Image (cartoon, grey):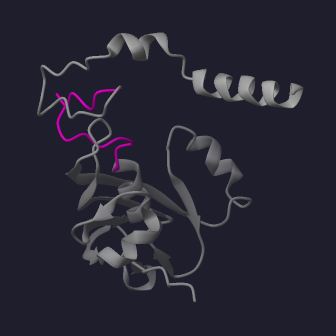
């Protein structure tokens, strides 16, 4: 059974031209799971959307905010980060084919969405702002030293750490064990 996507509807029939409207709300943590990769939402996602209705255009702006947890990219310890995203979109009445002439005038605008009907669902804009704001790599701190590449020691807790057999690691190729296995199999076949 597929979960339903939350809706954030704005009804255009109730809106007056040249007026500004606000929509504020939250999306529950469990509804965010399908938007996340390895991260875990620690709070609901809150959003505040400002909508300005012109004659045939609707200008949407706003903010999203959530607290996420993921593993630090360098030391693999759980770390939290506050996510702040920005919503920006322009909705234009009509479909893409009817408004090709208008499109030339709007080439400098980004995030133009065409709509028909008497309502627009802003969930995709909220989700887009949230996903874009998530960093590719979480860090527990900018100065995180990470893990020793040889033994896995946390270099934040032991910054003076040095592996004793560093020379052994440097001399040994990444593929040396595979080479040994290949030689062993070749020797075994020749017997």
In the figure, residue 152 lies in which quadrant?
top left
Q: Quarter holding the N terminus?
A: bottom right
Q: Name the residue rendered at 23%, 47% in the picture.
A: 77
Indicate yes or no whether the magenta region holds residue 89. Answer: no
* Nearer to me, 5 or 18: 5
Q: Name the residue rendered at 31%, 52% in the picture.
A: 86
Q: Name the residue rendered at 44%, 64% in the picture.
A: 35
Range of magenta residues: 134-149
Most extreme residue toward the front, as rendered? 191
Relative to 81, 36 lies left or right: right
Q: Residue 129: where, in percent of width, then height?
A: 38, 55
Q: Residue 109: where, in percent of width, then height?
A: 49, 43
Q: Quarter holding the C terminus?
A: top right
- Where 189 sits versus 165, above or below? below
Q: Residue 10: where, in percent of width, then height?
A: 40, 78
Indicate yes or no whether the magenta region holds residue 139. Answer: yes
* Nearer to me, 88 or 106: 88
In the figure, residue 63 lies in which quadrant?
bottom left
* Nearer to me, 184 or 18: 184
- Where 28 sits versus 20, above or below? below
Q: Name the residue rendered at 11%, 34% in the picture.
A: 157
The answer to whether residue 169 shows anywhere in this view is yes
Q: Magenta stretch mostly in which secondary structure?
A: loop
Q: Residue 176: where, in percent of width, then height?
A: 59, 21
* Nearer to me, 187 or 168: 187
Relative to 172, 130 lies left or right: left
């Amino acid at each position: 059974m597929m979960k339903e996507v939350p809706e954030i509807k704005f009804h255009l029939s109730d809106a007056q031209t040249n007026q500004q409207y606000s929509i504020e709300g939250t999306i529950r943590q469990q509804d965010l799971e399908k938007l996340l990769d390895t991260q875990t939402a620690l709070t609901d996602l809150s959003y505040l959307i400002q909508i300005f209705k012109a004659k045939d255009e609707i200008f949407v702006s706003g903010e999203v905010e959530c607290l996420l947890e993921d593993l630090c990219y360098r030391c693999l310890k759980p770390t939290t980060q506050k996510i702040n995203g920005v919503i920006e979109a322009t909705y234009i009445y009509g479909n893409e084919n009817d408004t090709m002439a208008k499109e030339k005038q709007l080439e400098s605008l980004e995030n133009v969405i065409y709509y028909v009907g008497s309502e627009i669902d802003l969930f995709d804009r909220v989700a887009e702002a949230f996903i874009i704001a998530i960093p590719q790599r979480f860090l527990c701190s900018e100065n995180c030293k990470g893990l020793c590449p040889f033994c896995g020691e946390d270099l934040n807790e032991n910054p003076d750490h040095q592996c004793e057999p560093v020379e052994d690691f440097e001399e040994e190729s990444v593929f040396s064990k595979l080479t040994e296995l290949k030689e062993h199999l070749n020797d075994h076949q020749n017997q």
